Image: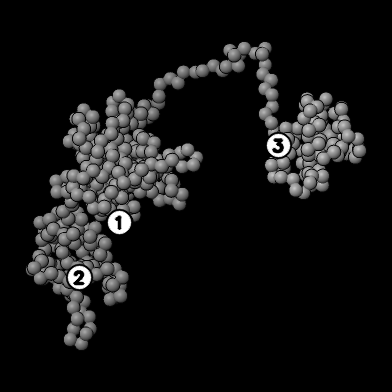
Amino acid sequence: MQIIACSSWSLQVPAGIINSFQKRFLLGQSRPVCSNEHSNDMDFPSQPSSTCGQRSDRTCVEDLCEVISKKVDPFTTRRTLVSSFFMYLSYCPSRYLSAQALGDPSMALEEVTPSVFPSGQLLPNEERIAQLFEKNTYSVVNIFDVTLRPTLNVTGLVEIPEGNGSGVVWDGKGHIVTNFHVIGSALSRKPAEGQVVARVNILASDGVQKNFEGKLVGADRAKDLAVLKIEASEDLLKPINVGQSSFLKVGQQCLAIGNPFGFDHTLTVGVISGLNRDIFSQAGVTIGGGIQTDAAINPGNSGGPLLDSKGNLIGINTAIITQTGTSAGVGFAIPSSTVLKIVPQLIQYGKVVRAGLNVDIAPDLVASQLNVRNGALVLQVPGNSLAAKAGILPTTRGFAGNIILGDIIVAVNNKPVKSKAELEKVLDDYNVGDRVMLKIQRGNEHLELPITLEEKNA
């Protein structure tokens, strides 16, 4: 027997199934599911109907719904209704079923396979970039915060935690430089020096990733830098070459190597887009003198190197400006001049020894309320400090309760100071024991006071 299946082609179905279908689902009624003929015969048409073949699948569905709603006992079980639906799918195949592949047996594989042309030699610029990557990729490591773990989401993709990032091999003794915020979760637990805070993967020359425990040496939140140490053989450690960031020019080429989204040793190329930018780091601090680049920097690139066209380290990638969480062409790196100043101190002392005046400076909001628009207002001066011995005066109250403003620092060695942040930025260029000349505004007077910088209190 042949039954029309609401399509332009027929389907051979055993008679037993048809009789069972008629008795169970149509309850003795003889109406064809997809036909304009309203016959009372008990048999389905034995030949394909042109009317049924021309009707749309939507009409077929409507007819079936009408049959089920009118002819099926209202107390029919849910299992029966579901079964009827799947029976319909069997008898009325969708027009979206895979088409039968025809092929062309008369064609040989050689006739349909295009010619493959050799790639040839790379262009000089491409060859140079490839060589720089091959040389420096062994100096870049992958860092995993030990307090975070990759997770598998419902799509089957491994989600890389934000605490995973990159780092660079600093020397042959196993020191690794990265960002503070890359291991920020572990650092928030206040680990002791020498405690394991990260897992460090290094790429060996044979292409195999070697895994090591990264022990904390020192960290500096103010500059978003941290140093780890691993116990690795010297042949595995390939220290990166450190270059000068003070001679960079906007427009020169740069390269970034890192592990964005967990894809290890990824290279991106761009140019220096800007210099002396203020970086708003993920560590919650503002870092001055930053390098801006349009080389793609994504989550996971943090702590990796920014290289110049000679393959020298000119910065540590640290932040991006984005609304999507991915690169928008505005990335930032901590300049190598800052890295060179901070990292040796972290290795030697476990902390950064900063020079300062050790006086309390009024926050910008307080200074503005006191009508101080230019300079850094001194609030308090410890009695035993070098600042007190130099003659710097604090802010006090008069007998009537009125506020008597203290000294206002407007310059350090002729470098203008307009706020508290600028004073800290200027003093950051000096070391403990350096002697500087302060320009002070005291009431209507302008004075110059020499002072020796001392270690800044934490």
Compared with 171, 162 (above or below) is below
Q: Can I make out residue 253 in this image?
A: no
Label 2 to label 1, Cα distance in Å? 23 Å
Residue to which mark 3 is pinned: 86
Of marks 2 and 3, which one's residue comes earlier in the chain? 3
Callout 1 amino acid:
Val
* Picture quadrant where residue 252 is located: top left
Where residue 293 sits: x, y (%)?
Answer: 37, 45
Where residue 431 sits: x, y (%)?
Answer: 14, 54
Query: Secondary structure beneath disc 2?
Result: strand
Q: Residues within 10 Å of mark 3 (few under 14, many from 20)?
A: few
In terms of depth relative to the viewer, which is nearer, 257 or 36? 36
Label 3 to label 1, Cα distance in Å? 63 Å
In the picture, which quadrant includes the C terminus? bottom left
Horizontal arrangement in the rendering, residue 77 relative to residue 169 (left or right):
right
Compared with 407, 83 (above or below) is above
Callout 2 amino acid:
Val
Residue at 69 percent of width and 42 percent of height:
79
Marks 3 and 1 in Cβ contact (< 8 Å)? no
Query: Secondary structure beneath disc 1?
Result: loop
Horizontal arrangement in the rendering, residue 148 relative to residue 404 (left or right):
right
Q: Residues within 10 Å of mark 1 (few under 14, many from 20)?
A: some
Marks 2 and 1 in Cβ contact (< 8 Å)? no
* Picture quadrant where residue 442 is located: bottom left
Residue to which mark 1 is pinned: 285
Q: Residues within 10 Å of mark 2 (few under 14, many from 20)?
A: many
Callout 3 amino acid:
Phe
Query: Secondary structure beneath disc 3?
Result: helix
Marks 2 and 3 in Cβ contact (< 8 Å)? no
Residue at 46 percent of width and 38 percent of height:
157
Where residue 62 sits: x, y (%)?
Answer: 79, 43
Residue to which mark 2 is pinned: 378
